[in-house]
Image (spheres, helix red, strand yellow):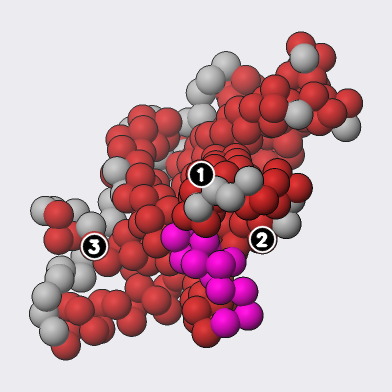
Amino acid sequence: MKRFIARRLMQGVVLLVMVATIVFFLGRLTGNPVDLMLPEDATAEDREALIKTLGLDGSLLDQFVVFVVKAVQGDLGNSIRMKQPAVQAFFDRLPNTLIIIPWALLLGMVAGIPLGVLAALNRGGLLDRFAGTVAVLGVAMPSFWLGVLLIYVFSVELGWLPSSRMGGPEHFVLPVITLGTFLVAGFMRITRSAMLEVMESEFVKLARIKGLAESVVIWKHCLRNALIPVLTLWGVFVGNLITGAIVTETVFAWPGIGRLTYEAVIYRDFPLLQAVIILKSILILSINLGVDILYAYVDPRIRLA
């Protein structure tokens, strides 16, 4: 088991190095932040001074070496626009993202799991086709399109809910629905597939032969076993929510790490962009490592894979 964890840790470190390298060079493709920071009447001397102040006066390779040396020491630099350590800016915004993720997960599980069970019980029927349509729409609809549609209907036309910013409980509704719609589709499809597989197993047939009530067979024997793959994928969904919140937070002007990432790109804030992507990667890798370890405990064959 220790070798398995050590191997996964090494793979995570290699992946993190690759992510940091890619985000460093790709970030420079967005342009020079000096162009956005200087006034129109700035002189060439002002430009050179600002470039030197920001540490952008060396070659790209020199800047990369400085970035790597500081990153190894835990220093991911200061945000150019916010004038504060990029790591601190990330952790200041992180709670705003984490506060909506549990609600999106709850929506996905409360709506998706029962719908998946009902679809499996009515395989090929009208309810199954309805659930399949919901799953296709949930996966196919782009988050920005769904968010704009919800704002138009519930904020502009009906005036029931606010369209942006953080505030009271009513501010959570539209962002949570936008984030959770994909999860409803995901949980529904996984639950349906798992239920169909369990319902064909020998122990379920034996339970029916013993004369147990159909409700006991379905909810106690089938659903309990069908939830195992659903729960193990829970960690994967959390990772997808953390990374996928960029569009939702941008549409609803939600001040989380998703919107922070968008702002870092728009304002060409290289240190902030690098810090956000690297710290997000660490979060995702940690979640996946935890899921892998749980898998290995549940199924020892995975340790040898």
Amino acid type, callout 2 = Leu
- Residue 97 left/right relative to 27: left
Closer to viewer: mark 1 or mark 3: 1
Position of residue 94 relative to residue 65, above or below, is: below
- Residue 227 left/right relative to 102: right
- Which residue carries the number 3 mark? 173
Mark closer to the chain start, 2 or 3: 3
Is residue 164 at least partly visible in the picture?
Answer: yes
What residue sits 67% from the left and 51% below the top? 209
Secondary structure category for the residue under label 1? helix
What residue sits 14% from the left and 54% below the top? 169
Work out which quarter of the rendered image holds the C terminus and state it: top right
Residue at the farthest top position: 2
Residue 43 quadrant: bottom left
Q: Which residues are magenta?
A: 113-125
- Disc 1 + disc 3, Cβ < 8 Å: no
Asked if the magenta segment contains residue 124, the reply would be yes
